[in-house]
Amino acid sequence: MKDLLGLEKMTRAQIERILETTRPMKALFTRSIKKVPVLRGKTVALLFFEPSTRTRSSFELAAKRLSADTLNIAVATSSVTKGESLLDTAKTLEAMKVDFMVLRHSSSGAPDLVAPEVKARVINAGDGTHEHPTQGLLDMFTILEKKDRVDGLRIVIVGDVLHSRVARSNLWGLTKLGAQVTVCGPATLIPPGIREVFGKKVQVSFNLEEALRGADVINVLRLQRERQEGNYLPSLREYTELYGLNQNRLRLAKPDCLVLHPGPMNRGVEISSEVADGPRSMILEQVTNGIAVRMAVLYMFSGPNGFTLDPSEIEKENNAIEPALRDIA
Ligand code: CP
């Protein structure tokens, strides 16, 4: 696999391999010496056509902690503003011999368009309403770290599922790992074909109180007002009344239920500050884990054949990363 375009295209074994590799990466960057030379000489270009705080900066930190060089393309001041196409921009970076293109774009499918045209590994950092695979991976890693499993957990994804690439990557990843997922939100914000795509692996609920009973994890989605062209909601106040996660609703879930949110949050709309800053909130832990997951992704896709589950390649990878970890222990 040359590129990371989405979790839909990955197998359970591939997802688990990335999550296994994330553990030593986290151990590495939470120590006092945070850098290893495993990607020395590689260049990671960050090409963000949409705003980002978490994803862009954590890819940059992840690349730097593996000793890669980073190239930030400021789209607002690049030749894109003169009408250069996405493909021409990608081919220009290819001519500069970058090894990775981390791409965020408002159009669903933009990374799929670029990937076959370049030798560089293309990593989808969020495309339109399609997928955000590294967010899905970091959400799963956060759950795994706290619960030791994903298989069999009751996970509720609540909010603007229709416009959410985070929800799509979570749905593909979590169902592959065996979670029981419920999506919940107003009917206008639930994708119409969701039952056809996921069958019995995903339940749909329009009643948050019902959906939360017995939940192990709640993933609260941002209400994406910038992607909502139609009138999906009568009012924000009604949305908060019916679907906002507050302390009273959280009590319906299991006592050790985790609360996730990909950020950025609309405090007081989809989540109350009390919950966002409370003891069950994993929101800042997710940010930390985002660096570790992205280190694992960059590392695992950097091999000559891209990401592989070939046992001899895995052994080579382990032989490269383990001494680096021992050196700083
Ligand atoms: N979760 C997420 O994608 O955040 P950013 O838009 O800040 O990257």
Image: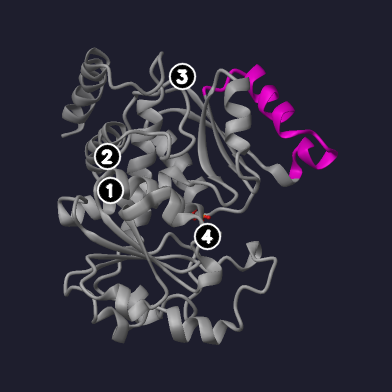
Q: Amino acid at mark 1?
A: Phe
Mark 2: secondary structure: helix
Question: How many dots with numbers?
Answer: 4
The residue beneath circle 1 is: 141
The residue beneath circle 4 is: 192
Q: Amino acid at mark 3?
A: Gly
Q: Is residue 96 magenta?
A: yes
The residue located at (48%, 27%) in the rendering is: 3
- Residue 96: give x, y in percent of width and height: 64, 19
The residue beneath circle 3 is: 41
For the residue carrying disc 4, how many other residues have a C-alpha within 10 Å: few (<14), some (14-19), or many (20+)? few
**Marks 4,1: beta carbons within 8 A:** no
Mark closest to the chain's N terminus, 1 or 3: 3
The residue beneath circle 2 is: 19
Q: Return the residue nearer the eye: 221 or 303.
A: 221
Please provide the residue range marked out in magenta. 77-99
Eye-nearest disc, 1 or 3: 1
Mark closest to the chain's N terminus, 3 or 2: 2
Eye-nearest disc, 3 or 4: 4
Q: Return the residue nearer the eye: 7 or 314.
A: 7
Q: Amino acid at mark 4?
A: Pro
The residue located at (17%, 56%) in the rendering is: 147
Mark closest to the chain's N terminus, 1 or 2: 2
**Marks 1,2: beta carbons within 8 A:** yes
Q: Is residue 10 magenta?
A: no
- Residue 151: give x, y in percent of width and height: 19, 50
Q: Return the residue nearer the eye: 57 or 207.
A: 207
Residue 219's quadrant in the figure?
bottom left
